[in-house]
Image (tube, helix red, strand yellow):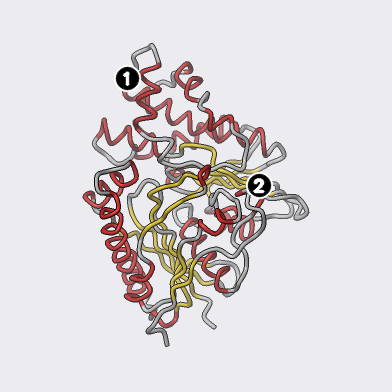
């Protein structure tokens, strides 16, 4: 039976579809990767839908169809690049695009029609990973800690894996296999910085954190933002664009009495991400010795310096030394989750999501043309 799986990931930033072909013959091995662009019009429509718009149901159906086609295109391009036939791939794990995440109300919705992906690629597709965890009483997120534990755990070192996408989440991997693996969303990752960069630089992100480096962190604004109730909430917890968005930032700035330069706001947002992550690690992972970063935030040099400064007793690095590039950890994770589903194995960690029990995640869409 084939050990090749594909992971498809589109995150909170909605900048591209990450597609990864992974060989699970032994430890996960990245075979080929492909970043498939999401054009600006589609991105804007997805942001409108996420924030609430006119005629939402029709808009959702239209975007579900468009994204299904786009995920299928990303898969086709990935296979071309790899020189691999679809028949050699056992399954696709598609995260989809989150357009609503309200765990307190027990619902989360990801779109990107898996029927289209399976039909157009000829590969069995697993999707809709979050809602079974929600049905079991969990938050439906984060799901990557189970994967982090499976591939990054080390018996000699207490580790923290930090995924910094639009939202940041941590996975605490104790050295002792008897200790419970923990993880949760810590708050904004890149989402506020990206929104501020788009507003002032007309760029989707602050490349390497260069703009934020030019500003000065405003401690009063930082302290004010850290009073948000989400940061005070104990885990399990998860969040998204519904809570942390540009409107949230505008309210924070309106409540702040001092006028700041745009660069200083960016610097303070960068520090907010670093401080909320390190607060979580200090409180919930006190024995951790090493921190490994993945996601787009790994390229923000200003953020990486802030994290190292706040965690002086840790070695802070990307996941590269652990064998997976920081850009592809999440895509590989959803390939792994598809594998878990097909093998009838749980993909969630109840200590992380708050679910009542481990459950097999996702819905399976068989490939009609698979040989």
Marks 1 and 2 sit apart, C-alpha to C-alpha, by 38 Å
State left or right for residue 342 relative to residue 240.
Answer: right
x then y, percent, for residue 305: 50, 34
Q: Nearer the viewer, residue 213 or 103?
A: 103
Which residue is rendered at x = 48% and y = 29% of the image? 272
Q: How many marks?
A: 2
Residue at horizontal 42 percent and vertical 43 percent from the top: 166
Q: Is residue 119 above or below residue 51?
A: below
Residue 261: assigned label: 1
SS at mark 1 in the image: loop
Between residue 169 and residue 287, name the one nearer to us.
169
Q: Which residue is mark 2?
A: 182
The residue that appears at 59% across and 67% down in the rendered structure is 27
- In this picture, residue 247 sits left or right of residue 311: left
Q: List the single residue furthest toward the left.
A: 41
The answer to which image quadrant residue 288 occupies is top right
User: Which picture quadrant has residue 252?
Assistant: top left
Q: Residues within 10 Å of mark 1 (few under 14, many from 20)?
A: few
Image quadrant in which you'd find residue 38: bottom left
The picture places residue 66, in percent across and down from the top left corner, at 27, 61
């Amino acid at each position: 039976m084939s050990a090749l799986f594909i992971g498809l990931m589109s995150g909170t930033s909605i900048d591209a579809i990450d597609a990864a072909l992974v060989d699970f013959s032994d430890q996960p091995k990245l075979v080929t990767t492909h970043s498939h662009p999401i054009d600006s019009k589609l991105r804007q429509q997805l942001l409108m839908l996420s924030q609430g718009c006119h005629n939402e149901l029709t808009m959702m159906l239209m975007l579900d169809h468009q994204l299904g086609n786009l995920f299928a295109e990303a898969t086709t391009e990935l296979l071309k690049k790899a020189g691999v036939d679809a028949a050699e791939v056992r399954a696709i794990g598609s995260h989809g695009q989150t357009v609503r995440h309200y765990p307190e109300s027990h619902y989360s919705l990801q779109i990107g029609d898996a029927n289209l992906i399976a039909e157009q690629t000829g590969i069995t597709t697993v999707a809709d990973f979050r809602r079974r965890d929600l049905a079991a009483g969990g938050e439906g997120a984060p799901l990557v800690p189970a994967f982090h534990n499976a591939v990054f755990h080390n018996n000699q070192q207490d580790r923290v894996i930090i995924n910094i996408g639009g939202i940041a989440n941590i996975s605490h991997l104790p050295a002792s296999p008897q200790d419970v693996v923990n993880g949760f969303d810590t708050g904004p990752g890149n989402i506020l910085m990206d929104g501020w960069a788009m507003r002032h630089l007309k760029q989707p992100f602050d490349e390497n954190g260069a703009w934020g480096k030019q500003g000065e962190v405003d401690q009063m604004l930082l302290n004010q933002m850290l009073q948000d109730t989400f940061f005070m909430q104990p885990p399990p917890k998860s969040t998204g664009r519904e809570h942390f968005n540009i409107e949230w930032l505008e309210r924070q700035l309106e409540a702040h009495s001092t006028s700041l330069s745009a660069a200083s706001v960016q610097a303070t947002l960068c520090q907010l991400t670093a401080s909320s992550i390190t607060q979580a690690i200090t409180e919930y992972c006190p024995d951790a010795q090493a921190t490994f970063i993945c996601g787009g935030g790994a390229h923000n040099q200003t953020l990486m310096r802030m994290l190292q400064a706040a965690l002086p007793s840790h070695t802070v690095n990307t996941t590269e030394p652990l064998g997976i590039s920081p850009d592809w950890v999440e895509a590989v994770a959803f390939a792994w989750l598809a594998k878990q589903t097909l093998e009838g194995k749980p993909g969630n960690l109840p200590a992380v999501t708050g679910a009542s029990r481990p459950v097999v995640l996702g819905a399976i869409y068989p490939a009609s043309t698979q040989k």
